[in-house]
Amino acid sequence: MENLRLLEHTDTVNSLLARYGVKFGIYKNGNFKEQLFPFDSIPRIIENEEFNYLEKGLKQRVVALNMFLKDIYSEKKIVKDGIVPEDFIFASSGYMIECEGVSPVKDIYSHISGIDLVKGKNGEWYILEDNLRVPSGASYPMIARDLCRKSSPKTFADVALEDNRNYASLLRRTLDNVNVGGHTVILTPGRYNAAYFEHSYLAEQTGAHLVNGSELEVENDNLYFKTADGKKERVGAVYRRISDEYLDPMTFKPESVIGIPHIYDVFKKGNVALLNAPGNGVADDKGIYYFVPKMIKYYLGEDPILQNAPTYLPFYEEDMTYVLENFDKLVLKDVAEAGGYGVVFGSSMIKEEKEKFIALLKREPRRFIAQEVIDFQDLDIIDEGKAVPRKADLRAFVLMADEPLVWKSGLTRFSRNPDSFIVNSSQGGGFKDTWVLSR
Amino acid sequence: MEVFYSQAINSCRYTIKCIPDSNARQKISDINIQMVPESKANWAEDAHGNRYIFGCNPEPHSYFKFRLTGKAECGNSSYDCEATENEIMLFRHSHGMTVPGPKIKEYYQNIYDSTEGFDQMKPVDKAILMMNRLYNEFKYEKNCTCVNTSAEEAMELGKGVCQDYAHILISLLILAGCSARYVTGLIIGEGESHAWVEVVNEGKWIGIDPTNNMVVSDSHIRIGCGREACECQINRGIMHGGGDQMQRISVSVIEKKSIQEVM
């Protein structure tokens, strides 16, 4: 069993990851704490054929989501045709008025998408969530694979595996596709960001400059990078790892000190590409998630290849009735929250909590979605030398370059708590490499 | 507009959004912009079609001035800008400072309950009705609200300035199912910039000025619009260095027989 050889190296790989600074920053009670992102060396293995199916479905989904974003910030046909209710657009915190009528380079909005999936016990895959703003996580399986290959080369000689270290070249191709002339930079808010390791690692791997806001400057209607010797060189593409609100204090949050004044004006004129484009929050809202299968049908005229987890919108009366009748077997999610927050299981509430929650639900039905609890497949992890089953999901990465590209790997996150379904790394979970078999 | 700095600042960046444009009800001509210190400004347009200029003063300075002069000819009665389908949709959802809270909802319910056939009224009539109520029950008072005061907060206070009147009326109109937006502009006389409301009535935008309890006439010069005040904020700036700053905005609109001149 070749895998066993790899398992013996778990500690070695984890200590190497620690040495490389593969950490995840979290804010707890107002304090910034960096913690290691624990790696489990039993990989998630996906058969070649199964991944081909996922790949087709993921491409279809991300193409439709991009078409949706383009439509929402221009004609809004999907709203006028009654597919998506107005409330889910204009009352969504992700809808940004500043993006109205603005065309990103080549009309690409979500260049880098992180799509979260789970596999049910029935063997079916379900989409849990789309992340179209600043999805992170690709660097972890990249570096883990690299370290595993070094510590256990024999394992990899024996399995026919898709190499996942090509993520950097896929990303580079995505960045180059929209670069309008000049440098490509990765804009980081700095080392206190949760994903700073990833920013620096991707910069190193793609050959882009890693910069912070103060190293970029707008002059007239172009963006420049200030070099160490005081020269200014034009920037054509910014892979920005800061959120929309902080990007430009002249257009968005005025108190932002990590953004670049007037960068949004340069973007509007088409003189720089921003990856991802601002405004994508309107498409990855948990409320909009419900409509993604309808979007696929609407824009592409195709049946969705990948399915959503069965979801109900209390906004619709009949769904509300269902939710109230089946409250105990559903999971409820606040559409405005992310990172595993604002998620409650109907069955876990005591009577008073339930009454309070139902009152809130009736008052603000648009704020919540309800989903059937999917009994997803457990994956084994090694805990104190023993294999134990844990809940896990998969974040797949879809890149929109000259054509949609799906990275043949992904970030598998697992919950370390045996009773928890929440695998988010902000909540202290660990990760695994994702192996896609090449035949 | 002038900004005085207590100490020289090293540099600043500005976005200025106060350039009126011609439309169906007003003709703008002879626009002249003067800036101290002089800098190359770039022109742009925002999501609502508001024109603005942006740029940078890279050299140290302790005084910044922006002066715009021009002529405006305003139509007497017709305030007939067509409302597009997208505008009608966008402006019937409250956002940010116009999101109603319990006070505004209660105020609206009160108007609704005390008005027979409210649902059958035309939007402009709903607007006039609510404007009358607001004008009589809300007190004009300076310095008790600020630029960040929401409609709900102002309603609770019971007093405020034109921005607050406009935000409250927008919030009420949206509750009544109308499309309504915030408008900035100028009125005859000297003083500050003004704000009022536009509501869609039979496919056209109609101006309603709740601070003055009037349907907008030829005395109003329109500058820009948005869902709320911050979307048509006149200026935004970022400076490096320096101490305190004092900003002064002055507006002067002089009527010329048939032509008004703005300074």
Image (spheres, grey):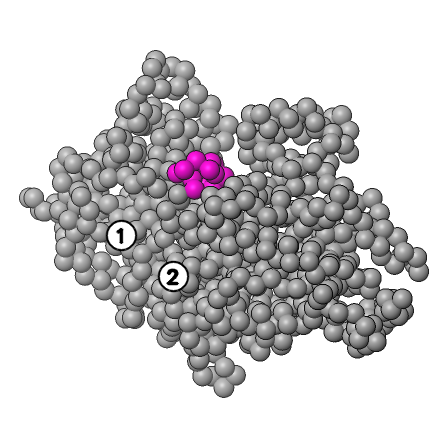
x and y percent of residue B53 in the render? 31, 61
Badge 1 marks a residue whose secondary structure is: loop
Q: Disc 2 on helix, strand or loop? A: helix
> Which quadrant, please, contains the N terminus of chain B?
bottom left
Q: Chain of mark 1?
A: B
Q: Return the x and y of residue B210 as percentages of the image width and height.
A: 30, 32
Q: How far apart, in angstroms, are the residues tagged by discs 1 and 2? A: 31 Å
Q: Nearer the viewer, residue A169 or A427?
A: A169
Quadrant of image for the C terminus of chain B: bottom left
Q: Is residue A182 toward the left or the right of residue B2 in the image?
A: right
Residue at the (47%, 43%) spot, across then down: A298
Residue at mark 2: chain: A
Q: Which mark is residue B250?
A: 1
Q: Residue at x 89, y 66 (%)?
A: A1
Magenta highlight on residue B21: no
Q: Is residue A194 left or right of residue A188?
A: right
Quarter of image, res A430: bottom right
Residue A282, can we see it?
Answer: no
Q: Amino acid at mark 1?
A: Ser
**Depicted A316 relative to depicted B63: above or below:** above
Say if the magenta span includes residue A81. yes
Q: Which residue is mark 2?
A: A268
Amino acid on which disc 2 is placed: Lys
Quadrant hosting residue B40: bottom left
Q: Which residues are magenta?
A: A78-94
